[in-house]
Image (cartoon, helix red, strand yellow):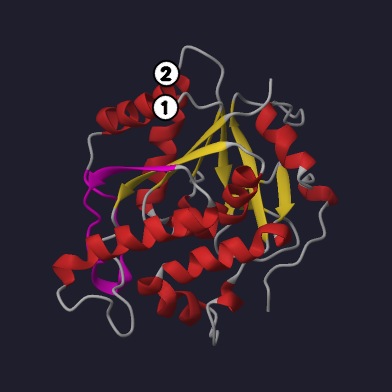
Amino acid sequence: MPLHNVLCCFAHPDDETFMAGGILAMLSACGVRTRVVCATRGEGGEAGEPPVVSDRADLGSAREAELRCALDRLGVHSLVLLDYVDPDIGPGDALGPFDADFDTLAGQIAAQIAGMPADAVLAHGPDGEYGHPAHRLIYRATLEAVQRQGRPVSFYSTAARVPGIEDHLWNASRTAHLVLDISPWAEAKVAAMECHTSQHALFKRRHRLATVREALRRVESVYREWPPLNGAPPDDDFAALLIAAGARPAAESSLPETDG
């Protein structure tokens, strides 16, 4: 069966662009309907340099607008905000999860999968990429939600490790099943990155970059979490579309790391 609907679950605005912006743009270009579920509005994160709002209480609304702009650039068809509150960054830049009852959160995601209905689901990896507790929470809740479905649904995590390419976003416990050079969709991803104005200083500061474009990652990778593969290559419709778009197993990949 052809792939029709893909649901993507993330914790904060900008996660969708950095983790899977190229894949989202590719799916849209191929006629697949996409929906992003975002747990929070990112109101606990950075406000920009200079700040995008004069009152920090308005940061969530500003970042929601940035998210909607980015999804439009990527061709995403719809957005669902779950209205959880992103906690402020703690002392020493400590990160925390948003406050949620796990069963309720998993149920909300399960309802989105069933209501779409989604053929495949994409979300954070089990390590939370760079260890973010909110990312790990979304991973666990999404896995639970997929397992609650009464029909087969493929679940892939993003930012799986690609041997030979160093990146602080990789989930170290997952070696990618498929790796995609997103160069054909790079301009859409850059346009989405440009929408996330409040995060531009962060994007550039991490790697001492002069422009947001230099932060572009041309490599995106996925790992199939469910159903388990037990050593076999992924053979579902999501994998077939990625492979048709040029994705390869990690062992066969020799891809550019950034645009710089």
Estimate the x, y position of residue 170 in percent, counting from the top left: 58, 56
Segment colored magenta: 78-99
Q: Which mark is residue 144?
A: 1
Q: Residue at x 24, y 71 (%)?
A: 91
Estimate the x, y position of residue 245 in percent, counting from the top left: 76, 45
Q: Residue at x 74, y 29 (%)?
A: 231
| Looking at the image, residue 244 lies above or below residue 44 | above
Task: Between residue 18 and residue 191, name the one nearer to us.
Answer: 191
Q: Is residue 98 magenta?
A: yes
Q: Is residue 226 magenta?
A: no
* Residues at marks 1 and 2 touching, judged by CB atoms closer than 8 Å: yes
- Crowding near pointer 2: few (<14 within 10 Å), some, many (20+)? some
Q: Which mark is residue 240?
A: none
Q: Amino acid at mark 2?
A: Arg
Estimate the x, y position of residue 86 in percent, counting from the top left: 25, 55
> Which residue lies under the disc numbered 2?
148
